[in-house]
Amino acid sequence: MSQMPQLSACPSCEWPLESGDRFCGACGYDLSVVPARPDDSPTIAMNGAPPGGPWPEVPHPPAEVHLPADLQGTESGGHQPPPSGPVVGSPVSPVSGVRFDRSPEPDEYVLQAPDPRVAAGPPTPAEGTKVCVACRAGRVDDDGYCENCGHAQPRERDHMEQEAGPIAAVSDRGLRHHRNEDAFTLGTSVLPDGSPATFAVVCDGVSSATRPDDASLAASRAAADALLAALPQGTHPQQAMHEAIVSASRAVNSLAAEPATAREHQPHQNAPACTIVGSIVTPSLLVVGWVGDSRVYWVPTDRSSPPARLTEDDSWAAQMVAAGLMNEAEAYADERAHAITGWLGADAYELDPHTASFKPDRPGVVVVCTDGLWNYAEAADEMAEAVPADAAARPLHTARVLVGHALDGGGHDNVTVAVVPFPTPVQGAGSA
C-alpha cells in the first residue's frame, strides 16, 4: 500500500504543513490525492547532468504582483497624492520600520472536486445540519471543515452587507484572498441639539500580521462604541473621531496579550494589526479620521462640481513625495510604494490619528473604503465615475456597484466600501 507523500507546503495554496496532515488547514486541499514521488530515477542525461542527478535547480516563476493604473487622486489641500500599488516584502523592515501589508499568495483558491473513486458517500446529514458546499454530502464541523472531503467552507465574513438608515456598506473577500480580513461598522446617533449624525468605520487587517481579521473586527467595533458614547454627550465630532481611533488602537493592542498556547504552532508571528478610516456626517459637518492607507472620497451629487479625496495615505510613497526625495513617478515605481507607515497594533511605533473636518456647500456622498477598492479607482475623478448618479438615494446599491467594480478589475484584495450621504437626512435618525 502506498504511503501519503510527505509535503512541507500545500500544493494548492502553499500553506505550511505538519507531518501527518491529511488536509490543508487553510484551503482544505485533500493531501491524499497528491501523487507520491516515484522511486525510480531517469536513465537519460538531461542538460549535461549524469543519469540519476545531480540536477540543476529550476527556480519557481515569480508570483504575480498586481500593479494598479498610474492614476492621480486629489487631496483636500489641493496637492496631488502619491499613487500606490501592492508590494511583496517582509512584515516589518528592520531599517525603515515600515510594515508591508501584502504577502505572497497563490493566484487562485480552487475548491477541490469530490473524489470520483468513492462509490458511495456518507449518509445525507439530518435536516438543519450544515452541508459541505463541495461534496454536498458531508457535515461541516465546528471548525468550518467538511468531515467527508475536508473542504474549508465559505466563512460568514466572505461577503457582508448592511444597511443602517440612510447609510450602507458591503465587504467582500475578493477573488484572490482565502479569507476576508476587512471589517466595518455603521451607526446613527442624535446630537444634543436633536440633529442626526451618521458614521461609518472601515478597517483593513494587515495580511502579514497575526490574526488580521480579528484586529480589523475589534478595531471597527471599538471605534463605533466610542462614537455612540461620545456624540450624544456633545463631544465635537472631530474630537469624537480622534477618541474613537484611540479606542480602536487599544482594542487591537489587547489582542497581542494572547495565551502562550495560542502561538504553539506559529511561535514567530507578530502582533495583530490593521488600518482604520472613518467618517462622521451631520447636517452641516463632514469629519474624517484615519491611520493607514484606507481612504475617504467626496463625490458631489452635482457631477459638474469636482470630487475630492479627503485623506492622505500613511505610506512609504507618500512620505517620499512629501519629503521631496522622489517625484510621484519614481515613488510609484519603487516596490515599497504600497508599504504602510502607520497602523493600529502593539508593534506600531506610535499612534498618530489623523482627523479633518469639512463643510461641503452642496449634497453628495462620502465613500469610505479600503485599498481593495481604490486600487481600481485611485483618482477622485475615477472614483466619481464609478459611483452611480443616484448614490445618495440608494447607498446599498452604490456599495454593491463599487464592490463589483473592484471585482471586475481583478479583485486582488479584500474589498470594503461604505456609502454615507451628506447631509444626514433628518428623517429616521435614531440611536443605533
Image: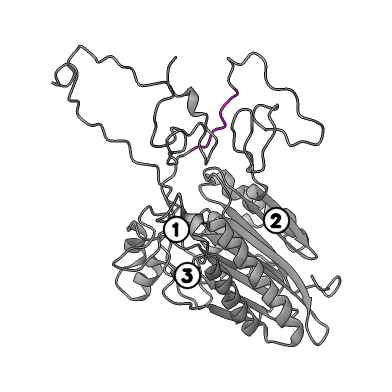
Let me know if residue 76 is in the magenta part.
no
Q: Earlier in the sequence, mark 3 or mark 2?
A: 3
Q: Is the C terminus in the top left, top right, bottom left or bottom right quadrant? A: bottom right
Residue 346: image tag: 3
Q: Earlier in the sequence, mark 2 or mark 1?
A: 1
Q: Is residue 407 above or below residue 430?
A: above
Q: Could you tell me which secondary element the residue under label 1 belongs to?
A: loop
Q: Residue 276 at what x, y percent from top left?
A: 56, 68
Residue located beneath label 1 in the image: 101
Q: Residues within 10 Å of mark 3 (few under 14, many from 20)?
A: many
Q: Earlier in the sequence, mark 1 or mark 3?
A: 1
Q: Residue 344 at what x, y percent from top left?
A: 51, 69
- Residue 385 in sight here: no
Q: Residues within 10 Å of mark 2 (few under 14, many from 20)?
A: many
Q: Could you tell me which secondary element the residue under label 2 belongs to?
A: helix
Q: Residues within 10 Å of mark 1 (few under 14, many from 20)?
A: many
Q: Say whether residue 293 is left or right of residue 59.
A: right
Residue located beneath label 2 in the image: 398
Disc 2 or disc 1, which is closer to the eye? Answer: 1
Q: Which residues are magenta?
A: 108-114
Residue 141: image tag: none
Q: What amino acid is labelled 3 in the image? A: Ala
Disc 3 or disc 2, which is closer to the eye? Answer: 3
Specify the quadrant of the image occupied by residue 225: bottom right
Q: Residue 235 at what x, y percent from top left?
A: 69, 87
User: Label 2, label 1: how many angstroms apart (C-alpha)?
Assistant: 27 Å
User: Label 1, label 3: how many angstroms apart (C-alpha)?
Assistant: 15 Å
Q: Residue 128 at what x, y percent from top left?
A: 81, 36
> 218 or 186, which is in the foreground?
218
> 423 or 88, which is in the foreground?
88
Specify the quadrant of the image occupied by residue 342: bottom left
